[in-house]
Amino acid sequence: MPDQTLKWDQKEIARYNRILKRADSVTLVSERYTSGCMLKRNRYMVDKGDLVIAVFNGIEKGGTWYAIQYAQRKNVPILIVNLKI
């Protein structure tokens, strides 16, 4: 989203911009924030990828959990990086 960094502090904006500069390509899946834009982003990543790498804390709700469930339904292989403490 073009205004994604609007409320971020300067340190996070600088980090984000460094990451963007290193990217081979950037795909915009939403022009603005909506209630479903993060789920749309997750579905896009699963649909376009050959493997899902999920950094997961074990809580079975939220965006990461949704992406894992979506990948399973689509038969996309998943590598889970476990963050349980």
Image (tube, helix red, strand yellow):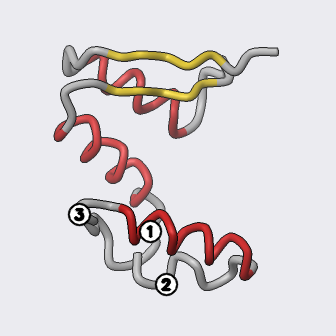
Task: State the residue position of label 3.
Answer: 25
The dot on residue 3 is 2
Horizontal arrangement in the rendering, residue 57 relative to residue 39 (left or right): right
Report how far apart the C-alphas of labels 3 and 1 lie in the structure.
23 Å
- Which comes before the other along the chain, label 2 or label 3? 2
Residue nearest the viewer, comparing 54 with 60: 54
Horizontal arrangement in the rendering, residue 18 relative to residue 73 (left or right): right
Query: Of the residues tagged 2 and 1, which is closer to the observer?
Result: 2
Label 1 is placed on what type of residue? Thr
> Please, is residue 60 above or below residue 67 in the view?
above
Residue under the point 51% across and 74% down: 17
Question: SS class of the residue under badge 3?
Answer: loop
Task: Answer few, some or many: residues within 10 Å of disc 1's Cα (few below 14, many 20 plus, some between 14 and 19).
Answer: few
Quarter of the C terminus within the rendering: top right
> Please, is residue 75 above or below residue 27 in the view?
above
Report how far apart the C-alphas of labels 2 and 3 lie in the structure.
18 Å
Label 3 is placed on what type of residue? Ser
Task: State the residue position of label 1.
Answer: 34
**Residues tagged 2 and 1 counted as in contact (Cβ below 8 A):** no
The dot on residue 17 is none
Question: SS class of the residue under badge 1?
Answer: loop
Query: Of the residues tagged 2 and 3, which is closer to the observer?
Result: 3
Task: Answer few, some or many: residues within 10 Å of disc 2's Cα (few below 14, many 20 plus, some between 14 and 19).
Answer: few
**Residues tagged 2 and 3 counted as in contact (Cβ below 8 A):** no
Residue under the point 40% across and 48% down: 39
Residue under the point 34% across and 27% down: 52
Label 2 is placed on what type of residue? Asp
Residue nearest the viewer, comparing 34 with 20: 20
Question: SS class of the residue under badge 2?
Answer: loop
Quarter of the N terminus within the rendering: bottom left
> Please, is residue 48 above or below residue 61 in the view?
below
